[in-house]
Image (cartoon, rainbow, N blue to C red):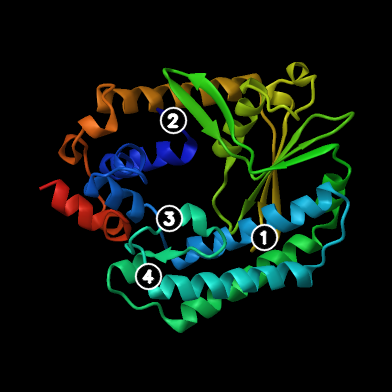
Amino acid sequence: MFWSISESRTFKRCQRQWFFKNLLGNARAKDPTRREAYLLSKLQTVSSWRGNIVDSVVSDLVVPAIRYNRTVTVEEAIGRARSLFDTQLEFARRHPLRDPGLSPAKLEGEFAAFHAIEYGEEIPQEELDRAWAEIETALGNLFRMTELLGELRTATLLCPQRALQFKHSGMTVRAVPDVVAFFRDRAPLIVDWKVHAFGLQEAWLQLATYAVALVRCNPHVDFPGNMSRWRAADVRLIEVQLLTNRLRHYSLTDEDEETVDSYIAQSATQMLLATEEKKGKDLTADEFAVTSSPDACKRCSYRKLCWEEGK
């Protein structure tokens, strides 16, 4: 089983939601319930969708341009975002989620599915207008972060969205930083882009886990050969709030690394105990506790499946 920061938070919020997403859902399963769980996992809010569009433009256009010393303008970035926005919005409004043969993985750049449409709700035009305005703001702010972009240009290697994995407490820890930057004469840098409307949420634990994963993972073939020289405390960490134009710098101590280890161990143990180490196909929804928050239940993508399967 895999463990990640997002999965640990889902498990804490609602064990049944975690079960549907991480254990039951399967894109290739012939069982209709497992297929349905997989499809429901693709639902998004407008807010999360617009954040994913920003992430896509940064990871697929901006970072590669920096890596290969090409010029990219804010106008190009916003143009790419607009194309994704319009294409995905048109697809999401049709909501062909259950069309025979549909494969979200094969529709990269086109696929989107909204929670609201799945559950028979309207998406107000003003919400879509706000989402687009925030995409423009986020990308505009990024291009004004000249000091950060300048540092990324001095890196010997930039790795966007690269999975880092290592074993811990009987599970495989998986972390996917937005950008890992390696330098010839400095410690690695991890950058995490955030697109929060208020920018109040701090991502220390997430970034700390990324640092631990970077120094413990089985290195990718293009990683520098001297990775063993670095400790988690050496890795530099930056949380970039693109909507509020703020950067938060974090650093770790050895005690902080112990805190991360304890958090992973406690969370992973709870997950293993909840499953009794069974496989997903051998578990049922009613074996997992549900959230005590009505709001969390209302926002959950698996609501219809949960009410049906967990009777």
In front of the other: 33 or 260: 33
Q: CA distance from mark 3 to mark 4?
A: 13 Å
Amino acid tagged 2: Phe
Q: Which mark is residue 95?
A: 4
In front of the other: 206 or 281: 281
Location of residue 279 with respect to 195 vertically, above or below: above
Q: Earlier in the sequence, mark 1 or mark 2?
A: 2
Q: Residues within 10 Å of mark 4 (few under 14, many from 20)?
A: some
The quarter of the picture where residue 186 lies is top right
In front of the other: 111 or 102: 102
Do the CB atoms of the residues marked 1 and 2 lie less than 8 Å apart? no
Q: CA distance from mark 1 to mark 2?
A: 27 Å
Q: Is residue 90 left or right of residue 250?
A: left
Q: Earlier in the sequence, mark 3 or mark 4?
A: 4
Q: Earlier in the sequence, mark 4 or mark 2?
A: 2
Q: CA distance from mark 3 to mark 2?
A: 23 Å
Q: CA distance from mark 4 to mark 2?
A: 30 Å
Q: Earlier in the sequence, mark 3 or mark 2?
A: 2
- Residue at 37% from the left image edge and 52% from the top image edge: 41
Q: Residues within 10 Å of mark 2 (few under 14, many from 20)?
A: some
Do the CB atoms of the residues marked 1 and 3 lie less than 8 Å apart? no
What residue is disc 3 on? Answer: 103
